[in-house]
Amino acid sequence: MKYTQLGRTGLKVSRLTLGTMNFGPQTNEADSHTIMDTALGAGINYFDTANVYGWSPDKGRTEEIIGTWFAQGGERRDKVVLATKLYGSMAVDGEAPWPNHDRLSALNIRRSVEASLRRLQTDYIDIYQFHHIDRRTPFEEIWQAVDVLVQQGKILYAGSSNFPGYKIAQANEVAARRGSYGLVSEQCLYNLAERSAEMEVIPAARDYGVGIIPWSPLHGGLLGGVLKKEGEGVRRASGRAAADLAKPQVRAQVKAYEELLDKHGLEPGEVALAWLLTRPGVTAPIVGPRTAEQLDSALRAVELDLSDEVLGSLDEIFPGPGPSPESFAW
């Protein structure tokens, strides 16, 4: 495994992030533990989760599964850089959300971190992330709450997810005025098929020393060889991938993508991950395996060197939006 610094911090993390969103809903506890053991054995030290994972009616279940894995000992907790998130309500379907049980008020930050610590069976979280922007809560209040948690030793760093570029800047400018450390990571939707983050999110993150953690690196399976699998009758596209493939332009791009990689003897899913690892500002894409076999494929991507020819062809098939403001102005 290869490692890099997380943004401007001194923290070393693996070039892949183990995403745990499938733990509970799609992968049972025993298999989830096996995947985490395999990931750690392969050198992946960066694990990501969120308090809502497990989804209704089992919100919090994913954190609980990670907690029972930590409880097995064997230096599991000490070796892992643990990231979790808060923002959404923990109320399950059919329950009316209770006031102050969601978003980023100081009250909910305090309440949520304590609940996550209990489920995770740990006394600290390495990176505590805001899952979405909160238009109602000022960053002065957010950083006040974060600073208290850092002083208490309950969290070490703060990160964001799904923030636009201007909010990354605003968050870190307010932090600087307070003498707070500010955001150190940003999880954003970023892959070959969805490159809008290149306009403002990634430039803002790079300017502020914020590490980029791309989620959905295969764009819901679209970049994982979906047409070949359909042709072989192995699996049909579903969800986001199916909706995108219904668009003629996207289907043509995916066809060209798979044909290019077939010519070079490369696997689509591995190339999609390897491409992200070449992008400026990217720290570690999130891979969310449902099985150990899917994790093995992701691990191979770290060692894959893409030629200039392949990289150039990928840009032709999936052109980025270009820098801002030139992408929409002169």
Image (spheres, helix red, strand yellow):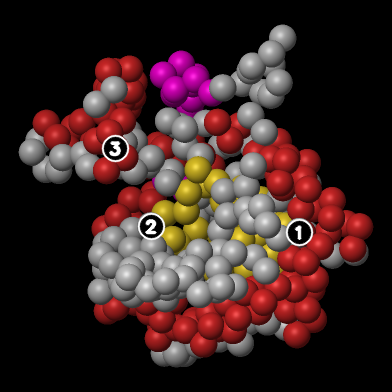
The amino acid type of the residue labelled 3 equals Ala
Residue 49, image x, y percentages: 48, 67
Q: For the residue labelled by badge 3, is the local secondary structure a helix, a strand or a loop?
A: helix
Quadrant into which the C terminus falls: top right
Q: For the residue labelled by badge 1, is the local secondary structure a helix, a strand or a loop?
A: loop
Marked residue nearer the N-terminal end (1 or 3):
1
User: Was residue 111 drawn as part of the magenta stretch in this picture?
Assistant: no
- Give the residue displayed 50% in from the left and 58% down from the top: 17
Q: Is residue 113 left or right of residue 72?
A: right
Camera-side mark, 1 or 3: 1
- Give the residue displayed 55% in from the left and 31% down from the top: 196
Q: Is residue 117 left or right of residue 64?
A: right
Seen in the picture, residue 25 relative to 218 is either above or below; the reply is below
Give the Cα distance between marks 3 and 2: 16 Å
Q: Which residue is mark 2?
A: 288
In the picture, residue 22 is in which quadrant? bottom left
As drawn, the residue found furthest toward the top would be 330
Marked residue nearer the N-terminal end (3 or 2):
3
- Give the residue displayed 57% in from the left and 48% down from the top: 162
Camera-side mark, 3 or 2: 3
Depth check, front residue: 57 or 53? 57
Q: Which residue is mark 3?
A: 241
Residues shaded magenta: 301-320
Q: Which residue is mark 1?
A: 138
Depth check, front residue: 99 or 57? 99
Marked residue nearer the N-terminal end (2 or 1):
1
Does any portion of residue 32 appear in the rendered image? no
Depth check, front residue: 68 or 283? 68
